Image (tube, rainbow, N blue to C red):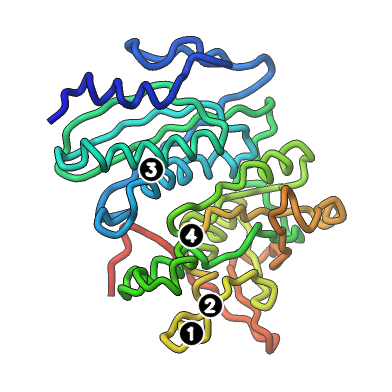
Amino acid sequence: MVSEDQLIERVRRRFPSLRGSLRVGIGDDAAVLRPGAGTEWVVTTDVFFENVHFLRKVHPPKAVGYKALARATSDIAAMGARARQFFLTLGLPDACAGAWLDGFLDGLALAARRFGLILAGGDTTKYPLVMASLTVLGEIGQGKAILRSGAKPGDLLCVSGTLGEAELGLRLIQRNLHRQKRWLKLLKKQHYPEPRLTLGKWLAAHRTATSMIDTSDGLSTDLGHICKASGVGAIVWAEKVPVARVPAELQRLGLDPLELALNGGEDYELLFTVAKKFSGRLPRKVAGVPVSVIGEITRDKKVMLKGPDGNSAPLQPRGWDPFRKKG
């Protein structure tokens, strides 16, 4: 058993906070922040629940801590902002207040260092299951945030990295194949996703993207969000989608690379649009992350998938939706 004060002190020791734009951090009633001149704050919240977003018996505590912060920080990347501070609200059962918490904090600290984030404060409580709520603050120049609503007909549709890797890891877990050593490397993106902060900042700085979103829910669903916000449609070229490499043995089990790429969530890649006249400015890689052109924005307010045979069919939003009825 630990007291709340002891738990907070364990967190505080892991995250020295008084620097940069944070004037007052952990230890007072509230944080005091000082934004830079000529900038705007970008603020996002994300919740991470045991048995909804992760399984305590399957996901290592270090991966849970890392992924909890990576998920929220990806929204900052999707706006083109620079990550600055974060707040953590943590609910824990007694069984997780010892070694499990230490592993969780290891992962959280690793993510904070990697993403350039400072823990500014938060709250803790006792709870029957593990619950982590993250609020992340980013900073961007005035008027430079990239929204979902700027796509125009004729814009090219682009995506970073590879799609379907995180979903592949999830399917292995669901099939109880994740403990086999030969498949362990396929779990990396499920456990340790990388929000594309550098690419997002590059797109904002060069004013290249007309709209953007992160692929947290899957391409088929997240593209629908862009189209709805922008009042447009889109056509995706199936052959151009950068799919995960799925071993033949797993493909025989029904794990289709294109289906994983279209409908699998939690890749946290950036899906964005670029005006054709500016497409020449778009490099093939940014900070080592590949960028692929996978389609085009259309006037027709439909989302379509064009197959290798040239035929097109509606691309239904079959990505993650916590309220969708199963079956």
Mark 2–mark 4 distance (CA, rounded to whole Å): 14 Å
Q: Is residue 318 visible?
A: no
Location of mark 2 (residue): 246
Location of mark 3 (residue): 65
Judged from the image, the secondary structure of the residue bearing numbered disc 4 is helix
Q: Residue furthest left?
A: 1
Which badge, 2 or 4, comes first in the chain's sequence? 4
Query: Residue 127, image x and y in percent?
Result: 17, 38
Mark 1–mark 4 distance (CA, rounded to whole Å): 19 Å
Lateral position of residue 304 relative to residue 137, left or right: right
Query: Residue 287, image x and y in percent?
Result: 72, 48
Instruction: Check whether the beta carbons of the residues at disc 3 and disc 4 lie within 8 A of each other.
Output: no
Counting every numbered tag in the picture gives: 4
Location of mark 1 (residue): 251
Q: Amino acid at mark 4?
A: Lys
Which badge, 1 or 2, comes first in the chain's sequence? 2
Q: In the figure, 321 relative to 199: above or below?
A: below
Query: Residue 297, image x and y in percent?
Result: 69, 62
Mark 3–mark 4 distance (CA, rounded to whole Å): 14 Å
Which residue lies at the image location 22% right of the left edge and 37% below the top edge?
Answer: 98
Lateral position of residue 274 relative to residue 304, left or right: right
Mark 1–mark 2 distance (CA, rounded to whole Å): 6 Å
Query: Residue 284, image x and y in percent?
Result: 78, 58
Q: Amino acid at mark 1?
A: Gln
Location of mark 4 (residue): 188
Judged from the image, the secondary structure of the residue bearing numbered disc 1 is helix
Judged from the image, the secondary structure of the residue bearing numbered disc 2 is loop
Which badge, 3 or 4, comes first in the chain's sequence? 3
Instruction: Check whether the beta carbons of the residues at disc 1 and disc 2 lie within 8 A of each other.
Output: yes
Judged from the image, the secondary structure of the residue bearing numbered disc 3 is helix
